[in-house]
Amino acid sequence: MTKRKSKVAVPAGTDTAPEVRAHAALDSKPEAEAGPADAGGGPHQQAYETGRAALSRLCENTKRDWLNWKLVMRALEAARSEAMKIAGTNKPEGKAYCKALSKILKREQLGTDKIDSKTRGELFKILKHLPDIETFIKTHDSLNHPSAILRNWRKTSAGRDAYDRERRQMPKKRTEATVLRENEQLKERIKEVEEERDQLQREITRGFDELGSALKALIRGPRPKIEDLTELSYDEVAEYTDHIDKLNNERERSVKQGSIN
C-alpha cells in the first residue's frame, strides 16, 4: 500500500495515479466550487464523481488502499450533507433524512448495490474521528479496509476512550431481563389492586348485611311507640337517614361494578 501524505501536491506535467489526482483536486477547491451545480449533486458533484471512480477501483482491484476509501468516504459525507439540507435538519437522523440519503446514494451510484450498509456505516464512524485515525493509519499501513482500520484503532487508548464516550451517550436499551422484571412487578401490582378491590367489596357486603339485619329487626320486631320517636332530635334522625342513603349508594355502585366485571 502506498503511503499518503496529509497534503498531496501534483506538479504540472507529472503523471500521477487517478486517485492521487482526484484527491489533490478536492483539496485544492472549496466545497462551493467543487464541480458544476447541475441537476446531480450540485456543489458536491466532484466529490460524487471521484467517489464513484474510487469505488470502481476498489471493486476491480484485489488490493485495497486507504486513499480510495477516503475518496468514497468524502462522497458519502457529501451525500449526508445534501440529505440533511433536503430534510431541513442539522442531524443525520430521522425519516426524512434517511429517505433523502437513500435517493441521493442511488442517484450517485453509491447505494448498497455498490457498497454494503455495514461498510458505509464504518466509514461514517471513521469520519467522526478522522484526524486521530489518519495518525493511526500512518503507522499501520497494512490495514486496508474500514472494518480492520476501525477495529484496530478502537484497541488503542484514544480509540477506546472515544468508543466509551459514544456508548455512554447512547440511550440505554431495555434488555429482555429488564422487560421480564418489569412484567413481574406489574403482575404483583395487579394482584395487590385486586386484593384491595375484594376487601372493599367484602366490607360493603358486610355493611349491607348489617343494614339488612337492622331493617328486618325494625320491620319484624315490635313497632316503636310514637312517643319514643318524638324523643329523637332532628340531628339524630338526619344522621340516620344520611347513613341509610350512603349505604344504598354504595350498594348500587357495587351492583354496577359487578355487572361490568
Image (cartoon, rainbow, N blue to C red):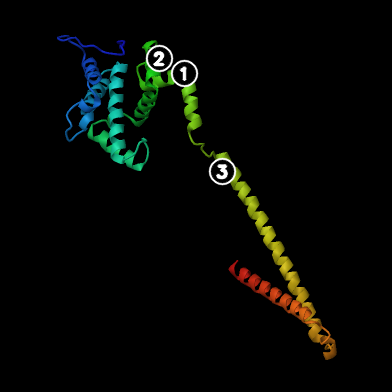
Amino acid at circle 3: Val
Q: Is residue 219 above or below residue 162?
A: below
Q: Residue at x 79, y 79 (%)?
A: 214
Q: Is residue 122 above or below residue 177?
A: above
- Circle on res. 136: 2
- Residue that mark 1 sits on: 158
Amino acid at circle 2: Phe
**Foreground of the two, 154 or 245:** 245
> Which quadrant of the figure has residue 64?
top left
Q: Residue at x 63, y 47 (%)?
A: 185
The residue most toward the front is: 234
Q: Residue at x 76, y 78 (%)?
A: 240
- Residue 123 in the image: state x and y as whole percent: 35, 25
How much space separates mark 3 and mark 2, taking CA atoms?
A: 41 Å
> Which quadrant of the figure has residue 135?
top left
- Circle on res. 75: none
The residue most toward the left is: 13
Quadrant for the C terminus, please: bottom right
> Which quadrant of the figure has residue 254?
bottom right
Q: Is residue 143 left or right of residue 194?
A: left
Quadrant for the N terminus, please: top left
- Circle on res. 179: 3
Q: Residue at x 80, y 82 (%)?
A: 233
SS for callout 3: helix
